């Protein structure tokens, strides 16, 4: 019994634990990058979008807010759909293609979706 325990602990501490620590490090780096993207998205949003969409509202068309219920109702409840809206615009909203980079648009879309999920 002791031999089996000793062998299992060697496997755990020699192989499994280092792998778990390594994977934990990768996932924590991923979260840090995601947080940085949200912070960058927030800054880009503040400089380009907040004039009409402050607090997730819509000062031009109040029925098309950035609240989750409206995003879902209008088919804009994914990062890809929000990026398409930012890129091309629609109705009174101008497109931002060529005005901000694709990565900035993706950061803004990620920020908008995150805020919508939190209820702004």
Image (cartoon, rainbow, N blue to C red):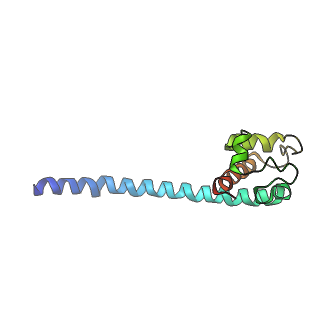
Against 82, residue 57 (above or below) is below
Lateral position of residue 75 relative to residue 33, left or right: right
**Numbered label tally:** 0
Residue reaching furthest left?
Answer: 1
Question: What residue appears at the point 80 percent right and 59 percent down from the top-left corner?
Answer: 54
Question: What residue appears at the point 16 percent right and 56 percent down from the top-left corner?
Answer: 5
Which quarter of the figure is the C terminus placed in?
bottom right
Q: Position of residue 16 (x, y in %)?
A: 32, 53
Lateral position of residue 108 relative to residue 47, left or right: left
Q: Position of residue 108 (x, y in %)?
A: 73, 52
Q: Position of residue 66 (x, y in %)?
A: 75, 51
Against 87, residue 19 (above or below) is below
Which quarter of the figure is the N terminus placed in?
bottom left
Q: 49 and 13: which one is in front?
A: 49
Against 1, residue 89 (above or below) is above
Q: Position of residue 19 (x, y in %)?
A: 37, 53
Question: What residue appears at the point 82 percent right and 58 percent down from the top-left corner?
Answer: 50
Lateral position of residue 110 relative to residue 91, left or right: left
Q: 99 and 88: which one is in front?
A: 88
Q: 114 and 66: which one is in front?
A: 66
Question: What residue appears at the point 68 percent right and 56 percent down from the top-left corner?
Answer: 115
| Quadrant position of residue 39 | bottom right
């Amino acid at each position: 019994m002791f031999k089996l325990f000793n062998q299992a602990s060697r496997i755990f501490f020699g192989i499994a634990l280092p792998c778990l620590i390594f994977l934990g490090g990768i996932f924590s780096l991923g979260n840090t990058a995601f947080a940085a993207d949200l912070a960058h998205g927030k800054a880009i949003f503040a400089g380009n979008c907040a004039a009409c969409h402050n607090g997730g509202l819509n000062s031009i068309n109040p029925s098309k807010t950035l609240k989750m219920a409206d995003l879902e109702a209008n088919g804009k409840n994914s990062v890809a759909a929000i990026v398409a809206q930012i890129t091309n615009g629609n109705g009174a909203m101008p497109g931002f293609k060529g005005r901000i980079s694709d990565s900035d648009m993706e950061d803004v879309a990620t920020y908008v979706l995150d805020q919508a999920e939190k209820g702004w």
